[in-house]
Image (tube, coloured by chain):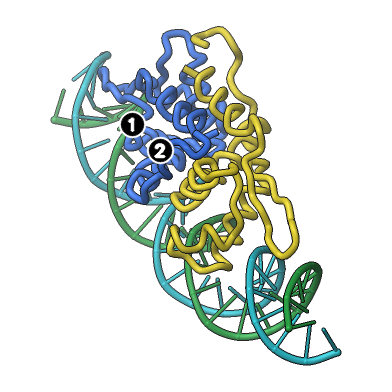
Chain colours: A blue, B yellow, C green, D cyan
Amino acid sequence: MPSGAPAMSAERAEELSKQFKAIADPNRLRLVSLISSSADNEACVCDLTEPLNLGQPTVSHHLKVLVDAGILHREKRGVWAYFSIVPGALDSLAGVLTEAR
Amino acid sequence: MPSGAPAMSAERAEELSKQFKAIADPNRLRLVSLISSSADNEACVCDLTEPLNLGQPTVSHHLKVLVDAGILHREKRGVWAYFSIVPGALDSLAGVLTEAR
DNA sequence: CCCATGCATTGACAATCATCGATGTATTTC
DNA sequence: GAAATACATCGATGATTGTCAATGCATGGG
């Protein structure tokens, strides 16, 4: 808000930075997009390796970054690990941007 | 959209990544916040150095990153350089996040 | 049991980045 | 025009990061 709300604290900026850093990578952006556009809104690592043209350890690493940031949810079923988007996580981040116009 | 829109292309991801990287730094988040919460929705470098507790070259560097990403606008008036938020830039980024639920 | 499969972790390496001091440049003032 | 001010640029350095090959760890099938 113009001259309404006070400026962001250093601590808050540090928090938000971690979430924005998580999605500020082209491959991680594509991961989120691939998951959200998949049939059941979830995907396993084996489904994500080929479209990104990346190795399995690299994809696994990126997914971990997104999970640690609270953006993705990880659920293990059998041998597979299914990843889905945490409800409201992206909307929360979007809110930060629209509020600071 | 769940199973509606196609997934994000590599090129589009690269574009968006640059903008998200620009705001994915704690000090740059505070810069945007400071500018948007200032009286006239603009600020010069000298106003931003002290609240961030950073040197002038460092602040100048961060502002350049934000300008190059199309998030901030730079206007020189006299000896001062005034920075303001490009209208709609943050809303555009926010839209990317809300659409990919 | 043993093997195959899916995924996570480790270690290493190159690339990128945030920060700073020193310096350059343009503008105003005297 | 000389000095001062506000800002940009350069070069360097330490830290972070993306990627991969190799390895470890569970789970399910025979």
- Residue A52 versus residue B54: which sits nearer the camera? B54
Q: Secondary structure at mark 2?
A: helix
**Image location (x, y in percent) of residue A36:** 48, 17
Q: Residues within 10 Å of mark 2 (few under 14, many from 20)?
A: many
| Residue appearing at x 42%, y 37% in the figure | A5
What kind of element bears circle 1?
loop
Residue A52 versus residue D22 in the image, above or below: above
**Residue A56 visible in the picture:** no
Residue tagged by mark 1? A70
- Which residue, given by chain and number where applicable, does mark 2 sit on? A19
A71, B37: nearer the viewer: B37
Question: Looking at the image, which residue is at 59% across and 12% down?
Answer: B5
Q: Amino acid at mark 1?
A: Gly
Q: Quadrant of the C terminus of chain A?
A: top right
Q: Judge from the rendering whether residue B26 lies leftward or rightward of residue A25; answer left or right.
A: left
- Spatial CA span between label 1 and label 2: 8 Å
Q: Chain of mark 2?
A: A
- State yes or no: discs 1 and 2 in contact (Cβ < 8 Å): yes
Q: Measured from the top left, where is residue B99 in percent x and y?
A: 54, 17
Answer yes or no: is residue B14 visible: yes
Which residue is pictured at 38% across the width and 39% down the height?
A65
Chain containing mark 1: A
Which numbered disc, 1 or 2, marks the residue that appears first in the sequence? 2
Q: Position of residue B79 (x, y in %)?
A: 72, 65
Q: On the picture, is C28 further left or further right than A38?
A: right
Q: Check disc 2 and give the amino acid type.
A: Gln
